Image (spheres, grey):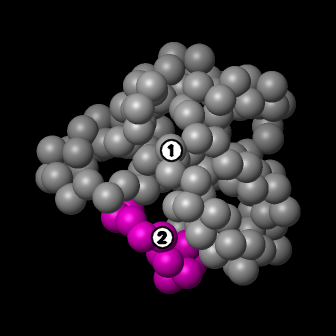
Amino acid sequence: MIHFDAIFLVDDDPINNLINNRLLNKVKVTEQIEEFLEGQFAIDRISELPVDHKILIFLDINMPVMNGWEFLEIYQERFIERNDKIIILSSSIDFQDRQKAQEFSIVSDFLEKPLTLDKIQNQIDKYQ
């Protein structure tokens, strides 16, 4: 059963994106998984999609060019009408990062890397 129109993997590490893409394909949440090595490319892509196109976004926070916090600020300003789910997926174990994530109402969860099938299933169960 498909719950999201698309899943976006926003991470500057292509290996992480590849592994996460394979894991997500196993649970068949969507047929459309897109990978972005830079946050701006994901922002550009979101702006092309209809407002009712529901996206699940896995967002890394430690990226060059545009980090995850900057992505969230831009998303919050530009896509007020959207109802996407954004999950921070980070190697950071810093409590301050978790606290900062809670300041963004659009962030639905904060997961530590690596992504696993259990973590994916827990997220899917939340949105059914």
Callout 1: helix, strand or loop?
Answer: loop
Q: Nearer the viewer, mark 2 or mark 1?
A: 1
Q: Residue furthest left?
A: 95
- Residue 116 is one of the magenta-drawn residues: yes
Q: Which of the 4 image quarters holds residue 27? A: bottom right
Q: Which of the 4 image quarters holds residue 32? A: bottom right
Q: Is residue 62 left or right of residue 50?
A: left
Q: Which of the 4 image quarters holds residue 114? A: bottom left
Callout 2: helix, strand or loop?
Answer: loop
Q: Is residue 100 left or right of residue 60?
A: left
Q: Percent x, y for residue 15?
A: 56, 61
Residues marked 2 and 1 touching at CB (< 8 Å): no
- Dot 1 alpha-carbon crowd within 10 angstroms: few under 14, some 14 to 19, many 20 or more: many
- Looking at the picture, which amino acid does disc 2 mark? Leu
Q: Percent x, y for residue 2?
A: 81, 67
Q: Residue at x 44, y 47 (%)?
A: 60
- Looking at the picture, which amino acid does disc 1 mark? Asp
Q: Percent x, y for residue 82?
A: 66, 32
Question: Which span of residues is magenta-colored?
Answer: 111-121
> Which numbered circle lies on residue 12?
1
Q: Quadrant of the C terminus?
A: bottom right
Query: Is residue 125 visible in the rendered structure shown here?
Result: no
Q: Nearer the viewer, residue 16 or 55?
A: 16
Q: Residue at x 50, y 20 (%)?
A: 74
Q: Quadrant of the N terminus?
A: bottom right
The earlier-in-sequence mark between 2 and 1 is: 1
Q: Residue at x 53, y 68 (%)?
A: 123
Distance of mark 2 from mark 1, alpha carbons?
Answer: 15 Å
**Which residue has dot 2 on it?**
115
Q: Residue at x 59, y 25 (%)?
A: 40
